[in-house]
Image (cartoon, helix red, strand yellow):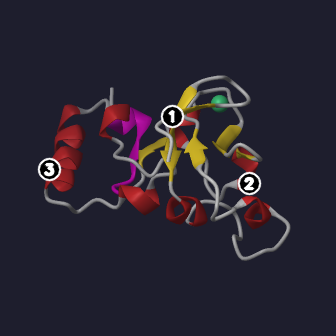
Amino acid sequence: MATKAACPECGNMCLPVNMQTMKHHVKKPWLDGQANGKLDEQVDYYFCPSQGCATVYFSSQVQIKSNDLRLEVGVKSENESALICYCFDVSRADAANPDIKAYVTAQTQAKQCACAVRNPSGRCCLKDFS
Ligand SMILES: [Zn+2]
């Protein structure tokens, strides 16, 4: 798997995301010809975190947009109520509170988080805290 690839919509260099993560976020992945028609086990996909870019996942062949996902992608939103930590229900406003960040850090160190499936990026959310 390549390390990074450019988002075809915004040009941001994006990190890879695995198929398990996408299956937990794309709408009705069992439906043929819709969102899951874009999920090809044989190709590499990437996650674009850019605000203002509608592309969430992409491969060399397809783009999967925000409205193909079940939930709003918090890091792509400017809303204070947008979710930053999907494991522990932390909004952007909450993430500015050092006590809440400390809680999430402790839970992560105790391996109580589930970023690989809960977070649309498939990665730890702590880097997204202010
Ligand atoms: Zn993008």
Q: Nearer the viewer, mark 1 or mark 3?
A: 1
Which portion, as a residue range, is magenta? 87-95
Q: Which mark is residue 68?
A: 2
From mark 2 to mark 3, how far is it between C-alphas? 33 Å
Q: Amino acid at mark 1?
A: Lys
Which mark is first along the chain, 3 or 1?
1
Q: Is residue 34 above or below residue 60?
A: below
Disc 2: CA contacts within 10 A as few (<14), some (14-19) or many (>=20): some
Give percent across and percent down for residue 30.
Answer: 72, 76
Q: Which mark is residue 4?
A: 1
Asked if residue 38 can be seen in this view, the reply is yes
From mark 1 to mark 3, how far is it between C-alphas? 29 Å
Q: Amino acid at mark 2?
A: Asp
Q: Nearer the viewer, mark 2 or mark 3?
A: 2
Disc 1: CA contacts within 10 A as few (<14), some (14-19) or many (>=20): some
Q: Secondary structure at mark 2?
A: helix
Q: Secondary structure at mark 3?
A: helix
Q: Which residue is mark 3?
A: 106
